Image: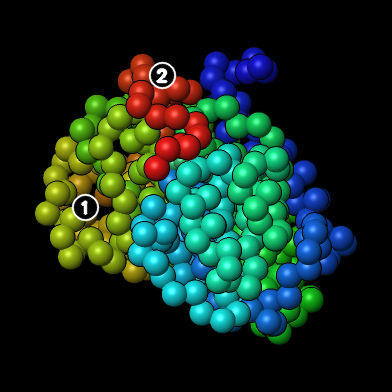
Amino acid sequence: DKAGYKHFMAKEIAEQPTVLADALRGYLDGDTISLPGEPLDFTKIERLTLVACGTAFYACLTAKYWFEQLAGLPVEVDVASEFRYREPPITAHTVALFVSQSGETADTLAALRYCKDKADKIVSVVNVAESSIARESDLALPIHAGVEVGVASTKAFTCQLNVLLLLALKAAVDRGRMTPEALAETLASLRALPGVLNAAMDRSDDINQAARQIAEARDVLFLGRGLMYPLALEGALKLKEISYIHAEAYASGELKHGPIALIDKSVPVVVMAPRDALFDKTVSNMQEVLARGGKVLLITDAAGAAEAGQDVWKTIILPEVPSILSPLLYAIPAQLLAYHTAIAKGTDVDQPRNLAKSVTVE
Ligand code: M6R
């Protein structure tokens, strides 16, 4: 049931504030993070191996920044189809963590089975609680996104981010890197996030305007730095999946190592950059694009917009949030941009060509 929306994808994008609020409640006991099932003590864990495919992989890549920065925990991340065949050594005190919406992705399941007798513990972050990946894990953490019908994953992505962030925060507290007071402050911001996401949804018309022109492009680049790099990758994946426009994402700092050769006025460049500690660096990469005639769509906050200069083609202004929460917020315009571009092109948004919701072949 599309509940009055034209597409499941639109409904699932709009549901995010509500499902995230519910999901958060499922993991909090006051200001303590409480996981369902087997306890997970991060003082005993020396390394995390995160494995997934597609959008779930980008959630893992985001989580790497969180686990490393907040908890000082070394993290390896890989796509399941590479991980399983590389036969990577799993060192002592490693937890292997698998992220999958369906819980049935063949490569992710095979990677999990590879880790079974090697890792201290198998943890999964899943949407479908009865899935193979959930069943074969020592600890299966539900993301509580509800059924996701659109082939392009939207609410599952933000709900995966939510659980991974909570895990990273728990790791930070367990490992003495974060005080209970600092945790309480972050949790307060997380509780306020649904309202912030609703404010981001209000940018839909602005994004739609930009999308109408992006729909004319043959290629689109996405740039981001730090936590915005995995988001740029997710934005590019979303756009190519449903609009069939060639889209690629780069870490902003990589631009001058090759991709800058692609820049001309026909290539829109989507820059995702909240006014955080890395903003100035990203802006200087953006200036390099502008100097070569590139057409920049900047997604930022009010402070970022004020500092970015006049030459950008369009600016989408989002509310300000604490830096570590920015991936959950910036996912919204990335999803809306793909959605409106696909609508402008007239493609089948919910069931894009060549794609299946659950990839059970290798
Ligand atoms: O069910 P999973 O999370 O394991 O699926 C992984 C990918 O197949 C999936 O995220 C895919 O990339 C989506 N179509 C992205 O929108």
- Quadrant housing residue 189: bottom right
- Quadrant housing residue 345: top left
Q: Amino acid at mark 1?
A: Leu
Q: Is 243 displayed left or right of 191 in the figure?
A: left
Which badge, 1 or 2, is on the more N-terminal residue? 1
Q: Position of residue 93 (x, y in %)?
A: 60, 80
Tag 1 secondary structure: helix
**Residue 225 appears in the figure:** no
Q: Is 50 displayed left or right of 221 in the figure?
A: right
Q: Quadrant of the image for the C terminus?
A: top left
Instruction: In the rendered structure, find residue 290 and report the number of the disc placed on it.
Output: 1
Q: Quadrant of the image for the N terminus?
A: top right
Q: Position of residue 210 (x, y in %)?
A: 36, 33
* Relative to 11, residue 221 above or below: below
Instruction: In the rendered structure, find residue 213 and report the number of the disc placed on it.
Output: none
Near mark 2 (Cα within 10 A), the count class, few <14, some 14-19 or many ≥20, is few
Near mark 1 (Cα within 10 A), the count class, few <14, some 14-19 or many ≥20, is some
| Separation of residues labelled 1 and 2 (CA atoms) | 33 Å
Q: Residue shown at 64%/60% (left/top)?
A: 123
Query: What residue is pinned by disc 2?
Result: 348
- Does the residue at mark 1 contact the one at mark 2 (Cβ under 8 Å)? no
Colour approach in the figure: rainbow
